[in-house]
Amino acid sequence: MLKVDLVVIAIESPLLIGVYVDEAIFQTIEVDGQTSEVLPIQFEKLMREYHINRVLFANGPGSFMAIKISYIFLKTLATTTGIELFGADGFYFNGNRPIKAMNSMCFVKSGEDIKIERVEDFEKSSFQLPERFRVEEYSKDIEPLYILPAI
């Protein structure tokens, strides 16, 4: 069975999964739908086809429920199978552009700080899978970035 690393971006639809062999992108999967429905199905297929070594995932900010589901799913998978799990914020995957929060509010990163700000003329930017899986760029701190606006 081919040994692979995965990158999972599940903070908004579509779900993106990159399959990496020898640190280079080998396969790209893009699936529309709710994370709770599509993530387990995709992993079932991937685990039948590959030996998964490491997983990097976008741990936020973004859809609260998508972050929560992907974290619980991937943390459980890592705990039960021994797969190494790494995290990176969503800005790593979209060129540090604002990420939609709600209405005209967006998550914005400045330095190491992530805040919610009003962004006029917001243009949604797409998330991109990295061309290479460079584990030294990722963090073992996988705690979700739950950044919720005050009510």
Image (tube, grey):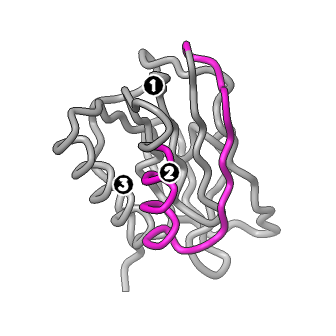
Judged left or right of residue 86, residue 128 is right
CA gap between label 1 and label 2 equals 13 Å
- Looking at the picture, tell me which residue is in the foreground, 82 or 130: 82
CA gap between label 3 and label 1 equals 34 Å
Callout 2 environment at 10 Å: few (<14), some (14 to 19), or many (20+)?
few
> Dot 1 corresponds to which residue?
1
CA gap between label 3 and label 2 equals 28 Å
Residue 45 among magenta residues: yes
Judged left or right of residue 72, residue 123 is right
Amino acid residing under circle 2: Lys
Which residues are drawn in magenta? 22-46
Amino acid residing under circle 3: Leu
Decide which of tag 3 and tag 2 comes sooner along the chain: 2
Decide which of tag 1 and tag 2 comes sooner along the chain: 1
Task: Evaluate if marks 3 and 2 touch, with contact meaning CB atoms under 8 Å apart.
Answer: no
Which circle, 3 or 2, is nearer the viewer? Answer: 2
Callout 3 environment at 10 Å: few (<14), some (14 to 19), or many (20+)?
some
Judged left or right of residue 55, residue 103 is right
Callout 1 environment at 10 Å: few (<14), some (14 to 19), or many (20+)?
few
What residue is shown at x 52% (from left), y 60% (from top)?
A: 11
- Looking at the picture, tell me which residue is in the foreground, 145 or 128: 128
Is 45 above or below relative to 63? above
SS at circle 1: loop
> Dot 3 corresponds to which residue?
145
What residue is shown at x 77% (from left), y 65% (from top)?
A: 122
| Residue 96 spot, x, y in % from top left | 64, 41
What residue is shown at x 68% (from left), y 48% (from top)?
A: 127
> Dot 2 corresponds to which residue?
45
